[in-house]
């Protein structure tokens, strides 16, 4: 899969397609030194990892917004092949 190929994103409130094959899981976290970690950047990291593992979609299962403990968005997602 090419590094710039489209990866479809299913947000928390969306169902994943029934025909989707589960490829793996992703956890994007704050490293403690992260400074560029807004939602779009974190989502792009998840898409890159999905492509690397052969997926063409992700289903977000958990999204933590910035708070007192971290200034970063954090995501858990399932990598899918549709």
Image (cartoon, rainbow, N blue to C red):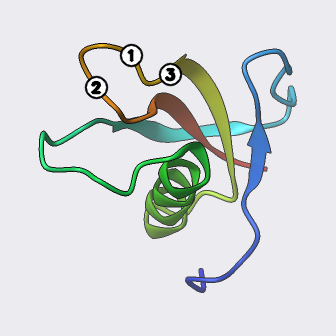
Residue shown at the point (53%, 31%) measured from the top left: 77
Question: Is the residue marked by circle 3 packed among few (<14), some (14-19), or many (20+) residues within 10 Å?
Answer: few
Q: Which percent across, then down, holds residue 34?
A: 23, 50
Q: Would you place residue 34 above or below residue 19 in this image?
A: below
Give above or below for 53 relative to 15: below
Q: Secondary structure at mark 2?
A: loop
> Marks 1 and 3: CB-CB under 8 Å?
yes
- Report how far apart the C-alphas of labels 1 and 3 lie in the structure: 6 Å
Split into 4 quadrants, where in the image is the N terminus? bottom right
Q: Position of residue 21 (x, y in %)?
A: 67, 39
SS for callout 1: loop
* Category of crowding for the residue at label 1, using alpha-carbon neighbours closer than 10 angstroms: few (below 14), some (14–19), many (at least 20): few
Disc 2 to disc 1: CB gap under 8 Å: yes
Numbered circle sitting on residue 65: 3
Q: CA distance from mark 2 to mark 1?
A: 5 Å
Q: Residue extending furthest left?
A: 32
Question: How many angstroms separate mark 3 from mark 2 (CA)?
Answer: 8 Å
- Residue 60 left/right relative to 63: right
Mark 1 = which residue?
Answer: 67
Q: Position of residue 30 (x, y in %)?
A: 25, 37
Of tags 1 and 3, the one toward the viewer is: 1
State how many labels appear.
3
Note whether 22 is above or below 65 in the view shown: below
On screen, residue 59 versus residue 29, left or right, reads right
Rendered residue at 48%/49% (across/down): 42
Q: In the rendered structure, find residue 70 and report the number of the disc placed on it.
A: 2
Q: Secondary structure at mark 3?
A: loop
Q: Quadrant of residue 11?
A: top right
């Amino acid at each position: 899969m090419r590094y710039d190929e489209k990866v479809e994103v299913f947000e928390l409130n969306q169902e994943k397609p029934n025909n989707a094959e589960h490829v793996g899981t992703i956890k994007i976290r704050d490293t403690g030194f992260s400074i560029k970690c807004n939602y779009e950047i974190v989502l792009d990291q998840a898409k890159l990892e999905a492509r690397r593992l052969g997926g063409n979609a992700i289903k977000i299962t958990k999204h933590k917004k910035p708070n007192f403990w971290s200034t970063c968005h954090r995501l858990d997602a399932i990598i899918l092949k549709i």
